[in-house]
Amino acid sequence: MTWLRSALYTGLFFLTVVPYATGAIVSGLFSASGPFRCARGWAGMNLWLAKVICGIDYEVEGLENVPETNGILYVKHQSVYEIFIGAKIFPAQCWVLKRELMWIPLFGWGLHFLRPIAIDRNSGGRAVRQVVRQGKERLAEGLWVVIYPEGTRVAPGRTRRYGMSGAALARESGYQVVPVAHNAGQLWPRRSWLKTPGRVKVVIGAPIDPAGLSAEEINRTAQEWIETTMRRISPEAYAAADAESEKTFSQT
């Protein structure tokens, strides 16, 4: 039944894009806040569908760590599911994302009105400067800036080098970094349409004040907290990944 439920949800997922993307486009012509209300509605609809059809729900730890003022979210990226959760938990926000998403018909057009920071991931330092420049503008407007520091979705138990753009933005702007860990990838894997019933654990960490810290120190502090927390909430995934790494090392 898992594949049938997953297939049903996937079909409905794509169908929900049409009304909500259209709503973001139309509302964006008249209101700055309208597109995000549509995005939040789309997130809520998909969280509900995932719960009802696929049996995936979530719980949040650390809501008391969310500051009253906006800031920079550092989010572990394993799935699509955490994007929905973030849109429900946090106020108006924009995302740092790959520019190719803006080219998707209708979806990308609606995304345009959410004012994301669309970067060329292969442009290196230029992308970092773009995130700092546009990120400061978005923060000054009261938006949260959402950054997936690994740059792409990673499998459970794995990590990649954290990019410097978010830390550079924090250093230049003075806004706090709020780290977020979760284990959504175990139930909603990357590159797979199959979804497993269960409860996703989301943990929000204490804000990191960039005052007196270098960009490298900000990045290291955020990464250490996220990866340590990931090991706490996904022990099986990290144990399996560690065992696989040890096996590979022993064979070399």
Image (cartoon, helix red, strand yellow):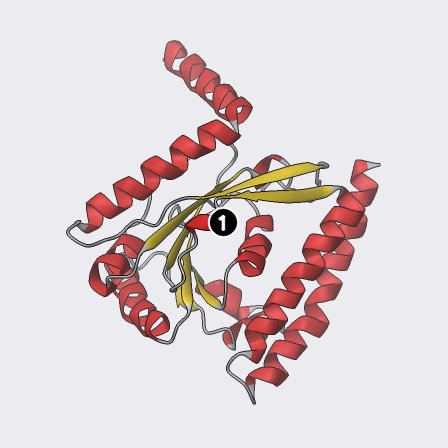
Q: How far across and down, in percent of the image, does residue 139 sit?
A: 35, 69
Question: What residue sits 38% from the left and 10% below the top?
Answer: 250
Question: What residue sits 74% from the left and 47% below the top?
Answer: 51
Q: How far across and down, in percent of the image, does residue 226 sit?
A: 40, 38
Q: Looking at the rendering, in which quadrant would you find the C terminus?
A: top left
For badge 1, the amino acid type reads Leu
Quadrant housing residue 109: bottom right
Looking at the image, is 237 positioned above or below residue 70?
Answer: above
- Residue with the mark numbered 1: 63
Q: Residues within 10 Å of mark 1 (few under 14, many from 20)?
A: some
Q: How far across and down, in percent of the image, does residue 13 sit?
A: 72, 58
Residue 10 visible: no
- Give SS at disc 1: helix
Observer-nearest of 29 and 44: 44
Which residue lies most toward the bottom here?
30
Looking at the image, is 251 positioned above or below residue 51?
Answer: above
